[in-house]
Image (cartoon, grey):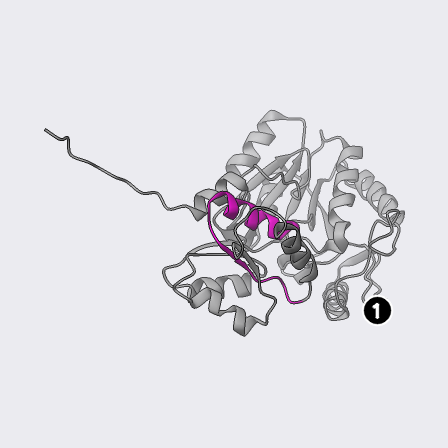
Amino acid sequence: MNLSVHKIAPAIASGCPIILKPARSSPLSALMLAEVVNTTTLPKGGLSILPTDRATGNKLVTDDRIGLLSFTGSPQVGWELKGQADCKRIVLELGGNAGAIVSPTADIELAVAKCVSEAFAHAGQVGILTQRIYVHQSVYDEFIARFVSATSELKNGHPLDSTADISSIIDEENAIRVEEWVTEAVNDGANLLLGGKRQGSYFPPTILTQTKPAMKVCSKEVFGPVVTIEPYSNYMEALNLINNSEFGLQAGVFTKQIDEMNHAFTELHVGGVIINDVPTFRVDHMPYGGTKSSGFGREGVKYAMLEMLEPRLLVKNRLS
């Protein structure tokens, strides 16, 4: 529902009629939202929800009557849709494998609490979750110990249980995929500190170290409750590790040094740098979007509206 609102609200504000195709595996929240919108003064037909398969939904991409395509999903699908959209305006939010840096001056307690919360929220099924963490070697052991301890205390339960911290992945097929990626990394030398054993569609919070950049758990978007934690020796090395990715959505930097904050902003190839918080941080009025394979264009109410509006110019000669 949150992803739908990021598109629907700016479209209403821009005076655009909307056709929303929800994800096939999660259409109910969008349909409930449509019921609410139907009670407002929005003109009937101003918002249509069309749960359908991808082949039928693709007509929204190719039909000339549709002026703009806004898509949130996988890079593979997103870039394919961009190629099919012809002259249509397009906004793509395609996720990533977001990284966080923890410097020697960081508040370790704060960094651990933030990173644990946003590495495993929604069972890791967030395109901007904290997936890769790089910690300075001087505080690495302390960070690892605190992180493993805090993660081990997370409670598994039903999504409607307010005391539960983590629940199942949306389907067993994706849980199996996450397990395969973790097993592949361990077989290639990664050290499994916690988790890693699937139970049906539930995959527990999983922590890996001694990983390699080419491993899928590092280079791809896991979209599951898996985090890698590695040490670094100097700040430029950490920045390069963040940049060593096909994605560039957002990055988090935990530091008390102004020069490190500024250096991160100038050197990191991402759409947003979040200081003393995780890359998952987002508020609706900020420009949100990424570089490289993470997307095209920006969301956030004002910025989404600019994508949905066409600048026009009228020049008149002076009447004599």
- For this view, does 314 lie left or right of residue 97? left
Mark 1 sits on what residue?
200
Total tally of numbered discs in the picture? 1
> Who is closer to the viewer here, 152 or 299?
299
Residue at x 48%, y 65% (from the top left corner): 60
Q: Amino acid at mark 1?
A: Gly
| Residue 240 quadrant | top right
Q: Which residues are magenta?
A: 1-24
Q: Where's the C terminus, which quadrant? A: top left
Q: Is residue 240 left or right of residue 184?
A: left
* Disc 1: CA contacts within 10 A as few (<14), some (14-19) or many (>=20): few
Residue 208 x/y as whole percent: 77, 55
Q: Residue at x 59, y 31 (%)?
A: 261
Query: In the picture provided, is 303 more to the left or to the right than 40?
Result: left
In front of the other: 253 or 83: 83
Residue at the (13%, 31%) spot, across then down:
319
Relative image position of residue 248 (x, y in whole percent): 55, 49
